Amino acid sequence: MLTLQQIIDESNNIVFFGGAGVSTESGIPDFRSVDGLYNQQYKYPPEQIISHSFFMRYPDEFYRFYKDKMLILDAEPNAAHLALAGLEKAGKLSAVITQNIDGLHQKAGSEKVFELHGSVLRNYCMKCGKFYDAAYIKESDGIPKCTCGGTIKPDVVLYEEGLDDAVINGAVKALMSADTLIVAGTSLVVYPAAGLIRYFRGKHLVLINLSRTDADGSAELVIREKVGKVLGEIKY
């Protein structure tokens, strides 16, 4: 069996597909672990709070949770983010597809990033479309308001909302042309994002995750370690 290093060495078009486990080593909580967002106590279940209908009906409660638990602006890229940026610069990696909304891949230097669930770094007025950065949201009192009086919404895909077609199409195109797919830090249970890996037709499928996934049986290599530890040891 080839090692991850050997697979990377013989690959020329790697695509990386990552989930919450990629950013936990940067101090950003995941959703389903013991310490994750879904296991914290709020007036409403987190899964309900981060839905479109809840945002529209109770924006004050949404923003109380969002600012406290999801808008983490002091996080820094970890070894995984940095390694992926390095692989891209070395001409080995063609795209990062991420379920995360933290912007850490770009902060590390990655340029070709498909953000399936949007980004906390982009925020728009629902009335006039004016852009606001994450700092404005974080520092606002209660519900962030635009200068026009409209409510500002994060450019984050909430439950009940569809994924962006352009992002999906770009991710699918990258997956279909890849010779190697590295899937890491994701339980592959959140759809439609998790279903995208079926578009991969390349040679090597690698899975890096602490717990098993439904795709383990299809992978050439399964690694049960933290993503940063594994990718931090890669030479490129």
Image (cartoon, rainbow, N blue to C red):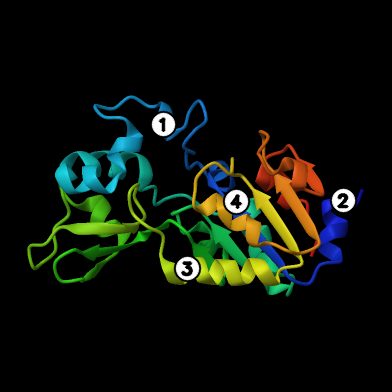
Give the residue at mark 1: 38
Q: Amino acid at mark 1?
A: Tyr
Secondary-structure class at tag 1:
helix
Q: Position of residue 143 (x, y in %)?
A: 16, 49
Q: CA distance from mark 1 to mark 4?
A: 23 Å
Q: CA distance from mark 3 to mark 4?
A: 24 Å
Q: Amino acid at mark 4?
A: Asn
* Sequence-earlier tag: 2 or 4: 2
Give the residue at mark 3: 167
Q: CA distance from mark 2 to mark 4?
A: 22 Å
**Nearer to us: label 2 or label 4:** 2
* Sequence-earlier tag: 3 or 2: 2
Give the residue at mark 2: 3
Q: Position of residue 119 (x, y in %)?
A: 40, 59
Secondary-structure class at tag 2:
loop
Left of 59 or right of it: where is 67? right
Secondary-structure class at tag 3:
helix
Report if residue 71 is visible in the image: yes
Quarter of the image holding residue 93?
Answer: bottom right
**Nearer to us: label 1 or label 4:** 1
Give the residue at mark 4: 78
Left of 134 or right of it: where is 117? right
* Sequence-earlier tag: 3 or 4: 4
Q: Amino acid at mark 3?
A: Val
Depth check: give the residue in front, 111 or 118.
118
Left of 236 or right of it: where is 58? left
Q: CA distance from mark 3 to mark 2?
A: 31 Å
Report if residue 232 is visible in the image: no
Q: CA distance from mark 1 to mark 3?
A: 26 Å
> If the image is split into quadrants, where does the C terminus sit?
bottom right
* Figure check: 233 above or below 64: below
